[in-house]
Amino acid sequence: MFFGREELIERLELLFRKRTSSFVTCRGRRRVGKSTLIEKFAERADARFIKIEGIKPRAKLNNAMELENFAAKLAAQTGYDSSVRETAWRELMWSQEVEAVLEYDVM
């Protein structure tokens, strides 16, 4: 069940209607409804919800592995060419390929 989150959904809707882009993170303790909040918002806004979770921390986990995981999950949900290898988060997030995929998905 989903109760008591109307104010948060309204705040997300305000951001969604802005004419400029916003980067929104949803963070908090485990199992408090973060994903459900975003899923409900996306459902009400008729928006695409791209869910990408990080890799569970483990020994020898490195930045390259996390970038590869992110690119693979983005590719699975959007068609992004995950063979494009970026070496830094900034390069990945602002690459022309990711930008084109996300712009296409929003339209």
Image (tube, grey):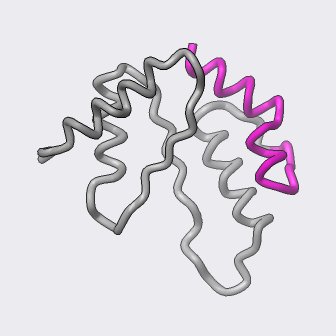
Q: Is residue 102 magenta?
A: yes
The extreme bottom residue here reads 59
Q: Quadrant of residue 82?
A: top right
Of residues 53 and 10, the one drawn nearer to the viewer in this rendering: 10
Count all numbered tags in the image, as a single digit.
0
45 or 66, which is in the foreground?
45
In the rendered structure, which segment of residues is drawn in magenta? 83-107
Question: Is 2 rendered above or below residue 14?
Answer: below
Q: Residue 76 falls in which quadrant of the image?
A: top right
Q: Position of residue 104 (x, y in %)?
A: 64, 18
**Residue 49 point in image, percent of width and height:** 45, 34
Up-down relation of residue 102 to residue 77 (above or below): above
Q: Is residue 98 left or right of residue 33?
A: right
Task: Please name the predominant secondary structure of the magenta segment in the image.
Answer: helix
Please tell me which residue is depicted at 57% across the width and 38% down the height of the picture: 23
Q: Residue at x 37, y 33 (%)?
A: 12
Residue 50 placement (x, y as % from top left): 51, 38
Instruction: Name the quarter where the C terminus is drawn.
Output: top right
Give the left or right position of residue 66, taking residue 56 as reference.
right
Residue for point 73% across, 83% down:
60
* Residue 104 to residue 43: above or below: above
The verdict on residue 84 being magenta is yes
Task: Judge left or right: residue 32 versus residue 49.
Answer: left
Please tell me which residue is depicted at 52% across the width and 56% down the height of the picture: 53
Q: For residue 98, what is the image quadrant?
A: top right
